[in-house]
Amino acid sequence: MTMDLGFVRKEFVPSKPAPGRTGGPILWAQKNLFSTPTDTLFTVIGILFLLWAVPPLYNFIIGHAVMPGGTVEDCRVEGAGACWAYIYARFNFFIYGFYPIQEYWRPNIVFVMLAALIIPLLMPTAPFKRINALLFFVVFPVVSFYLLHGGVFGMRYVPTEQWGGLMVTLIISLVGIICSIPLGILLALGRQSKLPIIKTLCVLFIELWRAVPLITVLFMASIMLPLFMPAGTTVDKLLRALVGVTLFSSAYLAETVRGGLQALPRGQFEAGASLGLGYWKRTYFIILPQALKHVIPGIVNNFIALFKDTSLVSIVGIFDLLNTVQSASSDIEWASPTQAVTGYVFAAFVFWIFCFAMSRYSLWMERRLDTGHKR
Amino acid sequence: MAVQDNIGGAPPRTSLLNDPVFRGIIYQVLVAAAVIGFAAWIVLNTAQNLAMQNKTTGFDFLFRTAGFDISFTLFPWSRTSLYWQAFVAGLLNTLLVAVIGIFFATIIGFTLGIARLSSNWLISRVATVYIETIRNIPLLLQLFFWYFAVLKAMPAVRDSFLLPLGIYINQRGIMVPKPLPDHEFIWVAVAFVLCLVAAIAIGVWATRQRTLTGHYPSSIVLAARVANAVVMFALGYLAFALLGQIIPGLATPMVAAIAALVLVAISFTPYRPYAGAFVASAITFVVAAFLLGGMFNAVPTIAVQLVALLIGLAVGWMMLERIGTAPVDASKFPTALPILVVVGIPLVLYWLIGAELAFEPPVLQRFNFQGGVQLPPELVALVFGLSIYTAAFIAENVRGGIRAVSHGQTEAAQSLGLKEGDRLRLVIVPQAMRVIVPPLTSQYLNLTKNSSLGAAIGYPELVNVFTGTTLNQTGKAIEVIALTMAVYLTFSLVTSAFMNWYNGRVALVER
């Protein structure tokens, strides 16, 4: 019996004619849009989809939208698009919440300080990294707290109930990340430790927080934290959320840092030990500088997740950006069919700008740190 | 030279404090003491606080009457139900939304992940824009958007939108017809499952025989020819019946049946691929005309039909290219056979035993819909939000998994002469799955955990029913939150157990 080897080609492939074009938009389209029948079909479907989706979207956001300066009557017209006039009128509320208007300069100073400190910190080539980091991680939080909170140097006291908007979103995410970095590093080191009790405690802590959703953590922080404190102590509502967010994100950060620790070759640990360095010196001078450098993209990704997750604090009654937008959408003064959607689009845009910028930074950093061979 | 020369001798005497083992013990004792002290402090404070508020602890509240309403439960719920039943209701609702969400997120995510790697510039750009937009916007915001801005902005009950198949959409959610299977229908369902198993068994056996002998057994080839003819007849009939919707002259069953028979006859001649291509393009034409008609209301029908016709022709052309002109032979997998077994046999049984699967459509009464199944808007919004959001992350995992397969594997497969489809199916996908599955399971876990956000839009899942209402009514903060956390901890442990098992199974064995 002869085997039917149907898949063996028996004749030569006829040689192809020389290519007619070697460049230009037509060749590009041929290659990238119409290379095979299937490709052509997908291109047609894609074009039809864009024809269907883009014009209404354009009309809503720009074409038929009511620009700042318009009135609520314009927004109530049948077929009107996004009511940007409403966003413009309520802009301060979305940024500062119920913060007193005459005190806006205080959050503004904090915003400027934040930008002035974080931009050089994120640029790998900027000088004075050590001082910069010290200012950002230690001095800046303290100064910002007294600036926003007031009650010192003759500044008016502003209770945290009046804080709100983008300001609170930024505060929660920054405090979350700044406090969770040292905690996360300690947890990651503990998880890698050879001491069984410390290792078990760290694993339990990390896995417990990672297993539960943030919303239950926030519920727990806002309901159970007052129970845990000595009788008579009151814990500020914002502080409760901050504690919950910090514990939650430190568990995730610990796992990211652990990735960096595990990526280091054993030789580095052994080299440090053979130099006669103790555990802490070895960790501080040899292990962490290398491990942390490698996980900068991971830490930024953690920060993106944390920044998005801060929106959950609106469930426990804190006026972050999402909650201000949500509560403003029932504002009778600007009641119109597109009011709610406009608010959501605005909030989505603000979140998107921050997250997209950070994810691009993380990608750029990854490429910068990647010294391997890529295809 | 200061060389320590104590090889073989006793170790030099040093302070006990410099002994690493001793120091390790000291550190651990200190940490353990601190943790225990902290825990004791918390327990004492809590006991003191609870005593001051005159509260007791314990799980006996679970067997008391709940006395509140739950808007949507999977089992009959009344105000006299107990708290543990509320817990189960919330848990089931969480699982329901997780299962539906995982189903859709997987489909959308895999499609997008592959689309983003597509060589077609337009498709990969559209997928990229989707992923980069969706994953950079908080899930809660998206849920608010779907719930408050889309579903709550639907028309009132009286002006409900009517979708095909008797589905209505209004402010109160989506109303779908309710299937009412009778007693005989259970046999059809059993037959379906048995046929599915049989079809898989036939496929495995046929493939194994082919691996052994180089061609499919003659019985399979014969059965495949019959199956091809039957499937061709069914599809041809469907195609002409659908064409009848647009071209009125073809509307009679007689015409469609004769035309389908002609197609079957063609399928036995060397012109077989043309019959298949014709059926494919006809069905695509009608479906595309219908969809495009819905999408572009303002465009005249004739233009829509022209575009739909072009799409149909493109699909036909694609089919011709793919099938080629090769006849049915012993080297091609008989796809039609399993399809016929799985669909055909239960269908025949359905007619034979007179089983009936009736549908009870929702009917608009004075104030609300009667009959049918009402899917509450909270559920719909949550499923929408979760699947669209998680799909963006799954797409990135899929893309990463496919990219992780080294390019050499593609080249090796090409040099073996494998076609595009076989290359993906036999070489790339099995290796990519090893990379995809672990992050995929953690995305599934994330989706399940994120379903707790349903509490914010009023979907009665675990956090809403239990950590919300039950906690407010009973005040048992510690017990309620501990139970809720235990549930999510269980989900997480089960997932990581699966992941460890899978990793152990598929890990590359090196050296």
Image (cartoon, coloured by chain):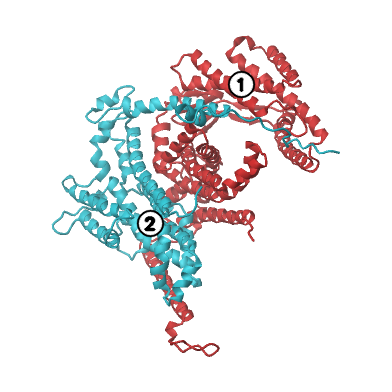
Amino acid under disc 2: Gly
The answer to whether B172 appears left or right of B352 in the picture is left
The front one of B50 and A72 is A72
Q: Which mark is residue B191?
A: none
Chain given the colour red: B
Residue A312 is situated, as x and y percent measured from the top left of the image, at 38, 47
Q: Residues within 10 Å of mark 1 (few under 14, many from 20)?
A: many
Separation (CA) of disc 1 from disc 2: 58 Å
Q: Chain of mark 2?
A: A
Residue B324 is situated, as x and y percent measured from the top left of the image, at 68, 27
The front one of A243 and A131 is A131
Q: Write the residue at 41% across / 65% down.
A: A288
Q: Which residue is mark 1?
A: B281
Q: Check whether the beta carbons of the residues at disc 1 and disc 2 lie within 8 A of each other.
A: no
Amino acid under disc 1: Ser
Q: Residues within 10 Å of mark 2 (few under 14, many from 20)?
A: many
Q: Which residue is mark 2?
A: A244
Residue B297 is situated, as x and y percent measured from the top left of the image, at 45, 18
Q: Which of the image's four quarters has the N terminus of chain A?
A: top right
Chain given the colour cyan: A
The front one of B5 and B97 is B5
